[in-house]
Amino acid sequence: MRQIDLVVIGSGAAGMAAAIEAKKNGINDLLILEKDEKLGGILNQCIHNGFGLTEFKEELTGPEYLQRFVDEVKRLEIPYKLNAQVIDLTKDKVLTYSSKEDGLVKLQAKAIIMATGCYERNAGAIMLPGDRCSGVITAGTAQRYLNINGLMVGKRVVILGSGDIGLIMARRLTLEGAKVLCVSEIMPYSAGLNRNIQQCLIDYDIPLYLSRTVSKVVGKDRLEKVVLSAVDENLQIIPGTEMEFECDTLILSVGLIPYVSLLNYIDCPISSTKGAVVNQYMETMIPGIFTAGNCLHVHDVVDFVSQEARLAGRSAALYLKNEIDNNEKKIPIKPGNNISYVIPQFVLENSVDDITFKFRVRKPLKDQVVMIRSGDIVLGKVVKPALIPSEMVMVNLSKDKLQEVKDEIVISVEDR
Amino acid sequence: MKQIHDVLIIGAGVTGTMIARELSKYKLDTLIIDKSNDAGNLTSSANSAIIHSGYDPEPGTNKAKFNVLGNKMYPELVKDLDVPYVACGSLTVALEEEQLEILKQLEERSKINGVPVQLLNKEEVLKMEPNINPEVKGALYAPTAGVIDPFNLVIHAMENAIDNGVTFLRNHEVKGIKKENDYFVVNTNKEDLYARVVINAAGVKADKIAAMIEDIDWAITPRKGEYYLLDHYKEGLVNRTIFPLPSKKGKGILVSITSSGNYIVGPSSEFADPDDVSTDAPTLANIKASASLMVPSIPFKETIRVFSGLRATCTRHDFIVEPAKSERNFINVAGIESPGFVSAPAIAEYVVNELVKPVLTLEKNPNFNPRVKPYHRMHYLNEEEQLKAIKEDSDFGEIVCNCEHISLGEIKESLERSCPPVSIKGVKRRCRAGFGKCQGGFCQPKILLLLAKHYNVSPTEIPLNEDGSYIIDHLIKEAK
């Protein structure tokens, strides 16, 4: 069995950034495994712009953004395998991949970075009520058909869920000649970025219905009609509020879920984000297995995926040089008031770097202050004029402050 | 010139395909037709997939007879047809003290039916199934129950019948039947078909077909069952099929493993229109509440799909396996609701030996081969076998379905068989591609293009399921 220092699983925005950073930190014996036929992951189908504002200080399309990383991977001569699907992983970091070219290959890795992205919640996961006709499709799959294969999924479209892919697809399908009748969002606020609401819906006169969801899908073979109903504060359908839309397509943009089947094989602890529990090095509870990007928690902006992955890449290099001590005291990080989760979920006490906490708020809030506390001690506070659930929030904590921590750190969002 | 077939079977569900296979043991010109574009597309594709032990049906009924006979046929049948099957056994649980008396009655009934069972006390139940409600008072254990891949069973039975000489016509819906001389003329939405013997295995529409021949004193009143299908994940929820106590509506809402290691929860039981396979939130909420009484820790957040199927419930409350009153060459096999899957091979034997034999000369087919050519299922093979398969055909190394690890080779293999898939769901039912947590989100475009290339048609021609359920509306440019 081939021994290898580092394997990066996935070559999207996270995988390539992680591999590049590991290489720059002196790891030469590494390999990227990509399941698809080219590098770049989902960015290949994201032909809209808006990428790279933080990373490159310019506005790029998905393929342009990923090409910068592909160029770097090639310049640094980082080896990669395409059409290579990892089908097994053990706790001892033996992984098996399958490919047409190589057949079944087992690798004994010293470190692994999981950068496997996410998958879309679908009709089954949301228990979409009504018929099982065709014409109901997730936004990302419709995007792949359109942008990769040149295939249009419909003519008259209703979109359920106002996540960013749904908004992007509202505009994309409109530009391609479809009539997008509306976007329906079950929550009282949008799940997408404000700029996408403006640029993808308002600019094209596409109505956004808040606090509304699909109460029935009707169609014998192909979708014929969608019924939308208003929901109450408990998200329960209110009878008598039905709106009917004759349409042939229902696009689902109802959330993304970290794709971590491999971590389930090795009983790696999973958090409420459905990604792994990690420390400040993006290391999972299994020493030497790191993770970053949308398979850790779903990001709003791809630039932050790449940033996070660089941290994982650098950490893997430190791990391989025995510069991370997993036996140090673990300080739990808890989400407090108004916060749904915090990454990382714990920190090792003697940190190499300052720590960035990432989290999302549960509901839109104004004039807030983010408090980082340990018991009665305030470790840090950051004023935030406005917070919305669709945007990831980041706050920093100096590593020196960890010495003041008692048992745990609680991050909360409070009125100023 | 009109071709007069020996036998025409209407309906390619589990009953029809098993009868076709049984008939293929003889030198007969057998035709089987279905209104769907595939075998096993309707009721046979949406059910609990339980091979029942036979503890429940009332002694003396057709249900009891065929269930018990059929159960004994399965171990060999699944080998011949290469169908995933887990002989896991079932538990029927009593959650209240008073219900223990009913368990004893079921034990008595099992003895009369000839089904091995064992009464278990609370401790024994919890030892076997630690996730059952700790308030459980006892259970009836039936070791001969099992779970099967229902899609593979029907499709492989069809394939085996075709391999042994049967002809399968898809997309043929019967519009009328009349007798002319010594044969039947069967009008369909396509051509007219002719046969000396007609077997009506039309599922929820069997009463409509039977009524084309004579007045009938029974009817099919379909009852819909809705289900949750949960992902397979490591922590064992249950290790076998867990039933509540049966009621008039059926065997109740069960919690079971499936042959693929997923978990299934359901079904509900409400009368419905014969084409209604929709799901609705209130019914699903009831299933959840009811199942959680038996197994409190069901992780419904792992749901990957909700679906419903129709039971061909008959007003006679038993299987109808008999010739029409006025016409012994017209055989009704109707009302095949639960325990239909387990009973189907036994019904097929009975139909051929007791009902067809008296009206047609049966001469053994010397070339009959009971076995389908084994399928490559990479996931089930050991490493050595996997390597061998990939060495022989590198397509077995290319994974198409990321969730279930289904290879391109497995999908291509299904296309080369005698009963190939024509739709996305056809591929899913044969190979499990698209069966996982992303529900085809990643692999559907690849499979759709593969099907379009294989059949040399536009991607707009590839349906999700039935013809008409197109996925692609139009091309914006020349597709790859």
Image: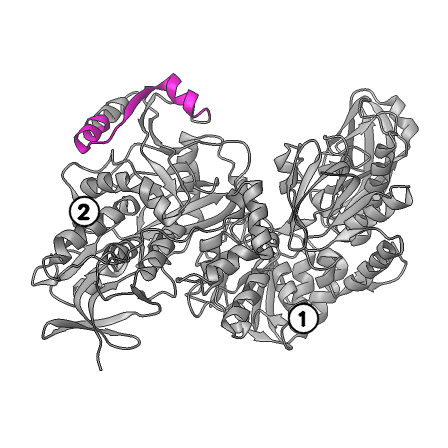
Q: Position of residue A323 (x, y in %)?
A: 88, 30
Q: Quadrant of the C terminus of chain B?
A: bottom right
Cα–Cα span, label 1 and label 2: 59 Å
Residue A151 visible in rendering: yes
Q: Which residue is mark 1?
A: A205
Q: Which residue does the image show at 25% across and 36% down from the upper left?
A: B54
Left or right: A26 in relation to B376: right
Cβ atoms under marks 1 and 2 closer than 8 Å: no
Furthest-left residue in this view:
B326
Circle 1 chain: A
Left or right: A322 in relation to A108: right
Q: Position of residue A155 (x, y in %)?
A: 57, 73
Which of the 4 image quarters holds residue B322? bottom left
Q: Quadrant of the N terminus of chain B?
A: bottom left
Left or right: A268 in relation to B270: right
Residue A229 visible in rendering: no
Q: Is residue B189 magenta?
A: no
Task: Give the magenta-colored segment's residue range.
Answer: B106-130
Say what secondary structure mark 2 lies in: loop
